[in-house]
Amino acid sequence: MAKSIDAAHSDTSFFGDVCQFFDHAAQFTSHPEGLLDQIRSCNSVYRFRFPIRRGNGFEVIDAWRVEHSHHKSPTKGGIRYSEMVNEDEVMALAALMTYKCAIVNVPFGGAKGGIKINPKEYTTAELETITRRYTVELIKKNFIGPAIDVPAPDYGSGEREMSWIADTYQTMNPGQLDALGCVTGKPLALHGIAGRKEATGRGVAISIRECVDIAEDMKKMGLTAGMSGKRVIVQGLGNVGYHTIKYLIEFGATVVGICEYEGAIYNSSGLNLDEVFTHRKMTGSILGFPGAQKEFKNSAEGLEQDCDILVPAALENQITISNVANIKAKIIAEAANGPTTPEAAEVLMNRGCIIIPDMYCNAGGVTVSYFEWLKNLSHVAFGRMDKRYEENANLNLVNMVEKTTGVTLDAVQRSLIIKGATELELVNSGLEDTMIRSYHEIRDVQMANPKIDGLRTAAFVSSIDKVAISYMNMGIWP
């Protein structure tokens, strides 16, 4: 059994929370303590500072890159742009990336980066300078490369920043054939991949759909199986939250509440996503939305309204011991990283709630990043080689069936059958298959051992076993 980390550390530390979850799950494995300690710990923590010229003076920027585990290469993880970012947070997020990749069977080790700025306070030119200088610092210490460590977008960063990173890396590595594989989340024009932007939100929606489709689990909570009629509150209207809402509605759910930092809105009959989004774009706030029955200036109150499913898609530590008693949702889908503290999670579990853990729930992003990385290494877009061949083969089959049966299909029917898959369709298919398989793999681990108290513990057990097997196969442990 793994030894517990320092209790005081776990009370105040995001990385401590992750380690607390890890240690709880480790007792259900049979690996030696030394191996567990290797898996738990961050292998490399690079903290650095660099100056940028700003106005007539200079400003010194704090930044980090953490590589948690090298059981697989390269390591993989986003770069967070936030004035709240710190070393402990980056370590925690890197650790979660290791477990996340193992859960969805993506062959990366976990990593994460952070730049301590509020991007809204900087001009585009200043952000470009910061991003390029950050990339240069990583290159100098061998903390970036298609076979070493591959960053991606995270909170506060996006396609634009990934483009600057890719260009900087290419400039400093002339002639490197796979240079564009040094970062994912790039725009399509710079060899990104279709479906990457919406991948995390789409994956969250698929994970929720898989959960509620299991009648046995829903019956225990007094809910019917299926997405239809499920009332959902989503915290966060950024990229992840927006696409989560979009696909949940597409799957048949009713989104009754939306929370943002400026406040929250609620309507028991459902909210129109596009109207809310347009209202916020025009006014700068979701408050004052005409379609809301209730609104709350304190955003946290929005989490406590009546619903079946709560999706925290913002930042960590949103459901804590101080507000968990007021949470009415029976299913918590962790679209953000670490939104539920261990103490709050225990209360929810004792109440019979299902928590779909972050390191599985939001793994859609890294899954599609993996597809983008493969595309960059192969230098061929998915579907380009075989789309036309597939369509011609399907056309020949349709013609033969029509000739044999005497039945003639109309133009729409022929088009549906003949059509070859686009890159976006292939990416979405791969993402959906990954999320479905992984959910049932985690649930099977939980069902196999009645002492395992939830999906998070089951997910940790599954990932610990996979990482341990990798280390043992490398010959590091007998």
Image (tube, grey):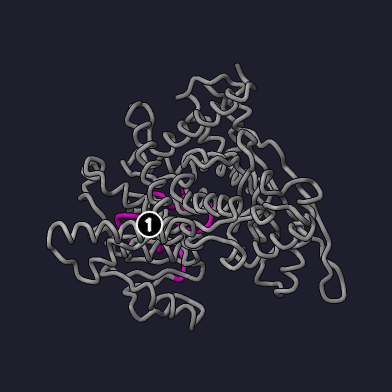
- Identify whether 12 is placed above or below 392: above
Left or right: residue 15 versus residue 345 is right
Picture quadrant of residue 174? bottom right
Percent coordinates x, y for residue 192 in the rendering? 57, 61
Picture quadrant of residue 427? bottom left
Residue in the picture at 80% in, 55% down: 49
Please identify the dominant SS of the magenta region.
Answer: loop
The secondary structure type at the circle numbered 1 is helix
Q: How many marks?
A: 1
Left or right: residue 221 versus residue 344 is left
Tell me the quadrant of the picture where the C terminus can be found.
top right
Percent coordinates x, y for residue 16 in the rendering? 59, 39
- Front residue of 3/432: it is 432
Picture quadrant of residue 440? top left
Left or right: residue 261 versus residue 412 is right
Residue in the picture at 38% in, 66% down: 246
Confirm whether residue 300 shows in the render.
Answer: no
Percent coordinates x, y for residue 160 in the rendering? 63, 68
Confirm whether residue 47 shows in the render.
Answer: yes
Q: Residues within 10 Å of mark 1 (few under 14, many from 20)?
A: some
- Front residue of 375/402: it is 402
- Identify whether 44 is placed above or below 307: above
Residue 283 on the magenta span: no
Residue in the picture at 67% in, 61% down: 83
Q: Seen from this angle, which residue lies furthest top?
A: 478
Residue in the picture at 34% in, 49% down: 331
- Front residue of 129/332: it is 129
- Amino acid type for the residue under numbered disc 1: Glu
Q: Which residues are magenta?
A: 297-325
Residue at image mark 1: 390
Residue 311 on the magenta span: yes
